[in-house]
Image: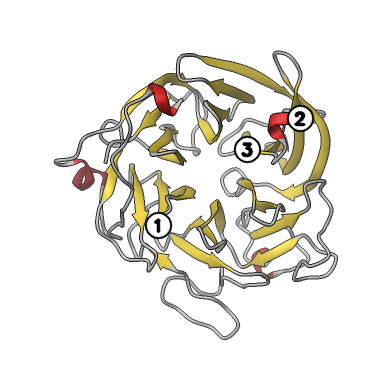
Amino acid sequence: MASKLRPALGLALVFSSGVTAAAMAQGMTPGEAVLDGLDYPWDIEALGDVIYVTEKAGSLGLFDGEGFTRLPVETSVPILNHRGGGLLGLALRPDFAETNRAVLYHHAGTPEARYNRVIEVERDGERWRETRVLLDNIPGHPLYNGGRVAFGPDGMLYVTTGWVENRALPQDVESLAGKILRLTPDGAVPGDNPFPGSPVYSLGHRNPQGITWDASGQMFAAEHGQSGHDEVNRIVAGGNYGWPVIQGDETREGMLAPFAHSGRSTWAPSGLTSSGQGLLLAGLRAGAVLGLSETGEVTEAYGAYGAGERLRDVLVVGDEVYAITTNRSPRRDGASEDRLVRLAP
């Protein structure tokens, strides 16, 4: 795919915690829409010349640079597409090229009794079919579900979960809510997890929706704060990131301060990736991909395609940077007019 589109011109970026979408758009070249007609896409991943896109209503599509093929995901438990819940995170298995198998995070249950699942799916002709459940009964919420899945450099599967608006659960190691979880690719608990017999890898999270690793293998996560105080955290095994006890610059013994945070302004961060020269963060409220240096400092950002579009996820493919929009708020139901965008520096 990279050969079919004009290359971007570099990725060394950082951002200002007080920046607004309007300010970032001034004097900047907007991104180029390379695929229109998406409806609330949530995650993008790439392999070779193909970009894979989940849509919240329950499809996992393929974009080859020329056309988009939307394939339904068939699950043993129906996907609940309501408010912020639906088909969310995607991770292509390390052996995807041979097996056509991927991992998905999806919402289930009813609006009165919600929960989340991590499943494995396999492409079967013109559909994706669930092959097994890797983790079930993750607490659910209309808005705070986490939802990201990713394979780390260690080959393990990492999963982010939301706090479900229950102040007790993020600090409770026995609960799966408000956590980053770590599983083997088969859904078992690794023997070297920080809490023996538990999938919990880190705790004290509010609504983490982005995870990535830098070139050194260091893990980072991005999460939504409450009334500002969005965070990017440097994740360590067993780390406690403080929610709801501390936020921003507050400290407490045994709890870790964020690598960077937005103060009283709001980025509404979701997808997070490494550019090789720092981190790139998709900002829903910011309406841009924000850049974070290796020391957490700020300078400039990619403007969104069109003023004010909400960016859900960001992906680096070779020398190019892509993002997806989710322009409808999760506080409302209905269609969302969205696109896949190639960003100009």
Q: Separation of disc 3 and disc 2 at Cα?
A: 16 Å
Pointer 3 or 2: first along the chain: 3
Does 280 appear above or below 196? above
- Badge 1 crowding class, 10 Å Cα cut-off, few under 14, some 14 to 19, many 20 or more, is some
Q: Residue furthest left?
A: 27
Q: Which residue is mark 2?
A: 99
| 206 horizontally vs 307: left or right | right
Residue 195: x percent and y percent?
78, 70
**What residue type is disc 2 on?**
Thr
Q: Nearer the viewer, mark 3 or mark 2?
A: 2
Question: Considering only order in the chain, which callout, 3 or 1, is on the residue closer to the N terminus?
Answer: 3
- What numbered label is drawn on residue 90? 3
The answer to whether residue 79 shows anywhere in this view is no
Task: Indicate the position of residue 98 as horizontal and vertical percent values.
Answer: 74, 30
The residue under label 3 is which amino acid type? Answer: Leu
The quarter of the picture where residue 3 lies is top left
